[in-house]
Image (tube, coloured by chain):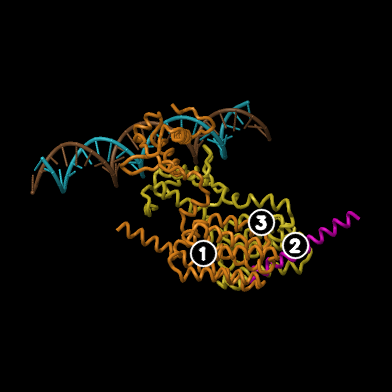
Chain colours: A yellow, B orange, C cyan, D brown
Amino acid sequence: MLQSRPTVTRISDAIATELEKRILEGSLKPGDRLPSERDFSAELGVSRPSLREAIQKLITKGLLTSRHGGGTFVTDRLDAHFVDPWQDLLSGHPMLHTDLLEFRQMLESQAAYLAAERATDVDIQRLDALYAALDMVYESNDVVACIAVDVAFHQGIADAAHNVLIGHMTVSLMKLIHGHVAINLEHLHDRPLRWEQLRAQHRAIWQAIRNHQPEAAAAAALSHIEFVRENLTDATRDAERRLSALRR
Amino acid sequence: MLQSRPTVTRISDAIATELEKRILEGSLKPGDRLPSERDFSAELGVSRPSLREAIQKLITKGLLTSRHGGGTFVTDRLDAHFVDPWQDLLSGHPMLHTDLLEFRQMLESQAAYLAAERATDVDIQRLDALYAALDMVYESNDVVACIAVDVAFHQGIADAAHNVLIGHMTVSLMKLIHGHVAINLEHLHDRPLRWEQLRAQHRAIWQAIRNHQPEAAAAAALSHIEFVRENLTDATRDAERRLSALRR
DNA sequence: ACTATCCAAGTGGTCTTACCAAGGTATATT
DNA sequence: AATATACCTTGGTAAGACCACTTGGATAGT
C-alpha cells in the first residue's frame, strides 16, 4: 500500500502527500486526531520512522501538531487563513450580512448542483441520515439542536459536491453564519406556516440531489436561501422596531 | 551536545534550527555536501533517525536536497523560503486545479452578474480603462504585463459587484491563480486564433456589464472560464507529454 | 597502453526492536 | 467520596541491520 510513488522515491514523501490529500479532501478534518503512530504505521503498511518523517514534514508545514503523550492532531490553519480576515470584518459591520447571504446563496446553489451531479452512494446515505435528523429535530423545540443539524445538513451537501474549495468555504462560512441561523430560527419559531415552508425547502433540495437533478437542486437551494434572506430582513426589522419602541 | 533544547522538546527541531543557523551564518554554503548521516549523527551526538527527521524538515523547507546513494546537499537557491501555504499545496496536488477553476467559474460569473446590475458610473469608467489597457497590452509580447492587467481586469469586475465577500475572495484566489494564468498565457502565446478568442471574451464581458445585462455578463464570464479550463488542460497535457518525452 | 566492464565500499532509505518520558485513566487507598 | 497511586497508551529517541542506488577504482579484455 502507498508504495506507488509517482516521481518521488521517498516513501515518507508519499505518506506526506497522502495525508495532505486526506486533509484537503476532508476525510481528516481540522481538530481530528490521527491514530497512534504504531497503529497508523501498521495501517499504512509502513514503518514507524517513515511515518514519523512524514508527520514531521507536515508539522513544519503547519498542517499537524503533536502533543507528547497525547496524540497528533490536524491543525485548523487552513480554515483560519480564509476566515480570519472576515471574522472581525463581519462582527464589526453587521451590514455585511446581506453580502454574506448573497455569497452563501451562490455557494450553496452551486454546491447543490454539483452534489446532484456527483453524490456517491455513501454521500446519499449520509444526506439521508442528516435529513432524517433534520426532520426529527424540527418537531422538538430545541433551537440549539436545530442549528447544529441544519448546519450539518448544508455541510453534508457541500461535501457531496466533491470540490475542496467549496467544502472549506462552506465550513468557514458556517462558522460565521451560526449567529444568523439562530436569529432566523428564533424568528420562525412562532410562525408555523413558514416553519413548514422551511421543511419543504430542505426536502426539495434533498430529493433533487437524491434523484441527481442538478438544475432542480440548484433552484431549490437558491430559493431556500432567498427565503432565508427575506426572513432575516423581517427579523432584523422586527428587532429594530422593538429597539425604537424601547427608546420611545 | 545539542541536547539543550530551549522551548522545544523535540530534538529533531533543535537539530533543524541548528542546521538552519549554520546555513544562514555561512558555515554551510549552498552546494556544500553534508557529512554522511552516520558520521553526522555521531558528531552531533544524536541518533540517526533524529538527524533524518531534521533533514526531512529542511528538505520540505527547500533548504536541503538529497540524492539516494549520493549525499545530502545545501540548496543553491534560497528563494524557496517565502511560500504561501496554499501555493505549495496546490502545486503538490494537481487535482485541486480543477476544483479551483470550478470555484473560480462560479465566483466570476456571479461577480459579472452582480457587476452588470450594480456597476456605478465610476465603476464603468474604471472598467473602461482596464479593458483599454488589456486590449493594449495584448498587442505587446510582454507576458508579465498581460498577467498583471488580466488580473486587474477581473478584480475590477469583482469590485464592481459591490459585495465585500466576493471582492475578498477574488483577491485571495487571484494570488493563487497567478501561476495558472502564466501557464495559460504561455500556452496561448503562439496560438493567434485562441489569443483572439480571449480578447473577444473579455470584450463580451465588458460590454455586457457596460450595458447592464446581468444574464449576458454571467454567461460571458462562464464561457470565458470554461475556455480557460479547456485551455489549461491542454497546456498541462502538453507539459506532461514533454516530460514523458524527456524520460524516454 | 587503453578501454570497458564489473564489483565493492559508501551513502541515503527503510524496517525492527527496544526503551524513555509525558498524558490520561482506572483503580485502590485513605 | 476525595485523593493518590499504578498502569496503560502515546509520542520521542536510540541502536542495529538490511536494501537500493552512486561512485570510483580494480580488473579483465582488447
Residue B116 vertical position relative to residue B9 in the rendered view, above or below: below
Q: Which residue shows up at 48% across the image and 54% down it?
A: A21
**Percent from the top left, x then y, of residue B52?**
40, 38
**Percent from the top left, x then y, of residue B204?**
58, 71
Q: Which residue is mark 1?
A: B138
Residue A232's tag is 2
Residue A26 vertical position relative to residue B231 in the rendered view, above or below: above
Regarding mark 3 in the picture, which secondary structure is present there?
helix
Q: Which mark's residue is nearer the viewer, 1 or 2? A: 1
Choose between B183 and A71: the one closer to the eye. B183
> What kind of residue is marked 3?
Ala
Quarter-of-image position of residue B167: bottom right
Residue B26 vertical position relative to residue A46 in the rendered view, above or below: above
Distance from the alpha carbon under mark 3 to that under mark 2: 18 Å
Chain containing the residue with disc 1 = B
Choose between B218 and B106: the one closer to the eye. B218
